[in-house]
């Protein structure tokens, strides 16, 4: 464990050569730059925590190769761009925390294959569109969704329903349209 040690700079790509590594916690440091794509080669990894750093740029799609990963925490960074659809291949994932970043776009439909996922936090990003139709998203508390641009879907009464195009229905526009007739 190298968490909470005030380590700074970039995460070294040499971590990718630690083939037997099962647990990697680099949280609560001052790492910046991007997540090295070579971390996707750590096939035996079960736990990856890079939270509370200053990591930026996109989540590398290569992380989707971590099919044995159970816990992934990338929260409290400055990650941006879309969530890679390849992450849907992480079918052993139980816990996913992407909160407090600058992620945008919609949650990939490939996430509907992540049936083992039981904890998800995507709060405080710029995400929009429908939530995947799996229990982790259907049963998520509101605090793990808030602070996003326009999520929609079937989460009790927490979110508006999606329209046919998979985006949030605009109830005001519909009212205005029907009042003209």
Image (cartoon, helix red, strand yellow):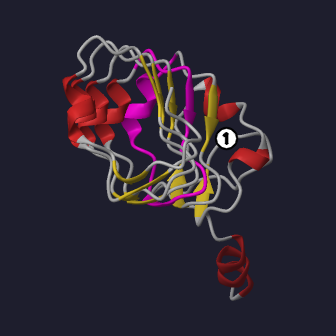
Task: Using the image, determine if residue 60 lies above or below residue 69.
Answer: below
**Which sits in the foreground, 80 or 49?**
49
> Could you say where residue 41 lies in the image, as x and y percent from the top left?
21, 25
Say which quadrant the C terminus sits in: bottom right
According to the image, label 1 marks what residue? Answer: 154
- The residue located at (55%, 57%) in the rendering is 163
- The residue located at (42%, 19%) in the rendering is 69
- The residue located at (59%, 66%) in the rendering is 149
* Direction from residue 36 to residue 154 in the image, left or right: right
**Which sits in the foreground, 170 or 118?**
118
Q: Quadrant of residue 43?
A: top left
Q: Is residue 120 magenta?
A: no
* Direction from residue 58 to residue 135 in the image, left or right: right
> Could you say where residue 56 lies in the image, as x and y percent from the top left?
39, 60
| Residue range corresponding to the magenta coloring | 91-115
Query: Circle 1 sits in a helix, a strand or a loop, which is it?
Result: loop
**Which sits in the foreground, 1 or 79?**
1
**Which sits in the foreground, 142 or 67?**
67
Task: Using the image, determine if residue 136 lies above or below residue 3.
Answer: above
Q: Is residue 99 magenta?
A: yes
> Could you say where residue 155 lies in the image, as x and y percent from the top left?
71, 40
Q: Quadrant of residue 15?
A: top left
């Amino acid at each position: 464990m190298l968490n909470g040690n005030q380590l700074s700079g970039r995460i070294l790509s040499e971590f990718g050569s630690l083939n037997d590594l099962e647990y990697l916690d680099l949280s609560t440091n001052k790492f910046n730059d991007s997540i090295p794509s070579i971390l996707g080669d750590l096939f035996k990894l079960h736990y990856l925590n890079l939270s509370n750093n200053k990591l930026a740029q996109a989540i590398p799609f290569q992380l989707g190769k971590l099919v044995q990963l159970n816990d992934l925490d990338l929260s409290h960074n400055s990650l941006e761009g879309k969530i890679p659809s390849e992450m849907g291949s992480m079918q052993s994932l139980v816990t996913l925390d992407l909160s407090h970043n600058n992620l945008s776009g919609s949650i990939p439909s490939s996430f509907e294959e992540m049936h083992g996922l039981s904890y998800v936090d995507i709060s405080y990003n710029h995400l929009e569109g429908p939530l995947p139709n799996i229990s982790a998203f259907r049963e998520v508390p509101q605090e793990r969704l808030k602070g996003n641009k326009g999520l929609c879907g079937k989460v009790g009464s927490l979110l508006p329903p999606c329209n046919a195009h998979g985006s949030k229905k605009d109830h005001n526009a519909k009212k205005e349209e029907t009042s003209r007739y």
